[in-house]
Image (cartoon, rainbow, N blue to C red):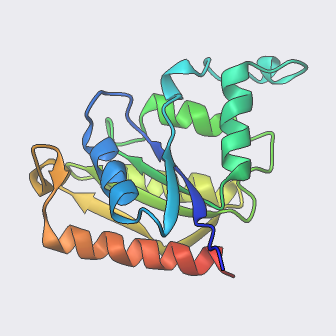
Amino acid sequence: MIIIPKRILAIPGSIRQSSSNEALLLYIKDTYKGEFDVTIYDGLALLPHFNPDLDKGEVHQAVVDLRLRIQQADAVIICTPEYVYSLPASLKNAIEWTVSTTVFSGKPVGLIVASGLGDKAFEALVLIMTTLYASVQASSNLLIRGARAKLVENRLTDPTTIEEIDAVMASLKAAMNK
């Protein structure tokens, strides 16, 4: 019997090269290879600024691609830093492009905020994704304070964080299998 791994779209909230958030998603992709097919979305910088007037008729190809990737995924993981006590504008922009759709409705979503503190971004992200009717379970969410200190040469080394990510992935797996 061939087992097809569940597809996870991993969206980093930062467009900075070699960000801590991308490193965490790469850790997840590598660690759970075989169990999940994790694709890291790299199109945040390609999305036009959200404007409801541009969401009529022929929509920008980058927006179509984002929506399709979310729709085709069995689950989504968003891993983001906190900028000025909120979400990075590029991530908020991407999420806004999904508001006129139902791509997140009922979709299992894991939310990870990895930042210095991160409380406000975490709170905002949970609220936004719940508003979009994503399936957001507390056990699939993780706030990683002091994220940079948990990485050595941009590789996750902190045993507590590794255990917490294991728990998030187990929760997300259970949500996908419902």
**Which quadrant would residue 51 be assigned to in this image?**
top right
Which percent across, then down, holds residue 14?
37, 34
- Residue at screen point 61% across, 40% down: 95
Q: Is residue 84 left or right of residue 74?
A: left
Query: For this view, does 58 lie left or right of residue 4?
Result: right
Q: Quadrant of residue 112?
A: bottom left
Residue with the most extreme right position? 57
Query: Residue 23 location, x and y as percent?
Result: 28, 46
Which one is in front, 65 or 124?
A: 65
Q: Which image quarter is the N terminus in?
A: bottom right
User: How many numbered badges does the structure rendering display?
Assistant: 0
| Residue 98, x across and y down, in percent | 71, 40
Residue 15 visible to the viewer: yes
**Residue that extends furthest to the front in the rendered view of this protein:** 1
In the displayed structure, 86 sits above or below 152; it is above
Left or right of 101 on screen, residue 149: left
Q: Residue at x 40, y 55 (%)?
A: 29
What residue is rendered at 72% in x and 21% in y? 61
Tell me which corner region of the image, top left, top right, bottom left or bottom right, holds residue 18.
top left
> Is 62 or 114 nearer to us in this picture?
62
Q: Is residue 98 visible?
A: no
Q: Residue at x 36, y 59 (%)?
A: 28
Residue 42: image location, x then y, percent:
48, 32
**Above or below, 102 relative to 134:** above
Say above or below: 2 vs 11: below
From this view, report whether residue 89 is shown above or below residue 2: above
